[in-house]
Image (tube, grey):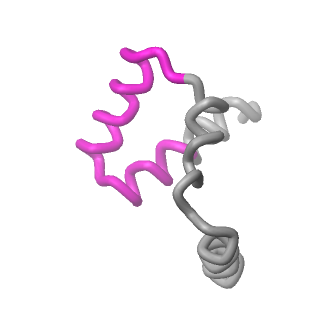
Amino acid sequence: MNTEMALRNEGMKVLINKLGHVEAERFISLIIREPFDYTEWQRGLFDNMSVKELSNMAMKEYKKE
C-alpha cells in the first residue's frame, strides 16, 4: 500500500472513531466545499490560551501516548 493511501485510510479511521461516520463525512464535505487554509487556522487556534493552559493541554496529550 502506498504512503498516501495509508495516510488517507488512517485519517478516516481517526475521524470516524472520534466523530462517528456521519460527522466524519460531514467534516470531509466541509473541507472540500469551503476554502480552508490550515496554516492560517492553526495560527489563531490557541490565541485565547495562556502558556500554562497550552502546556497543561500538551502534557495531557503526551501522557496519552
Whether residue 26 sits left or right of residue 42 in the image: it is left
Residue 16 image offset from top left, x and y in percent: 38, 51
Residue 39 image offset from top left, x and y in percent: 66, 31
Residue 39 versus residue 17 in the image, above or below: above
Residue sitting farthest toward the right: 3
* Residue at 62% in and 68% down: 50
Looking at the image, can residue 65 be seen? no
Residue sitting farthest toward the bottom: 63
Residue 21 versus residue 52 in the image, above or below: above
Residue 45 image offset from top left, x and y in percent: 55, 48
Query: Foreground residue, 44 or 29?
Result: 44
Residue 65 image offset from top left, x and y in percent: 69, 77
* Residue at 43% in and 25% down: 31
* Quarter of the image where one finds residue 26: top left
Query: Foreground residue, 27 or 2?
Result: 27
User: Where is the N terminus found, in terms of image quarters?
Assistant: top right
Report the span colored magenta.
11-36
* Residue at 56% in and 41% down: 9
* Residue at 36% in and 36% down: 27
Residue sitting farthest toward the left: 22
Looking at the image, can residue 43 be seen? yes
Query: Foreground residue, 63 or 49?
Result: 49
The kind of secondary structure the magenta stretch mainly shows is helix
In the rendered image, residue 17 lying in the magenta stretch gets the answer yes
In the rendered image, residue 40 lying in the magenta stretch gets the answer no
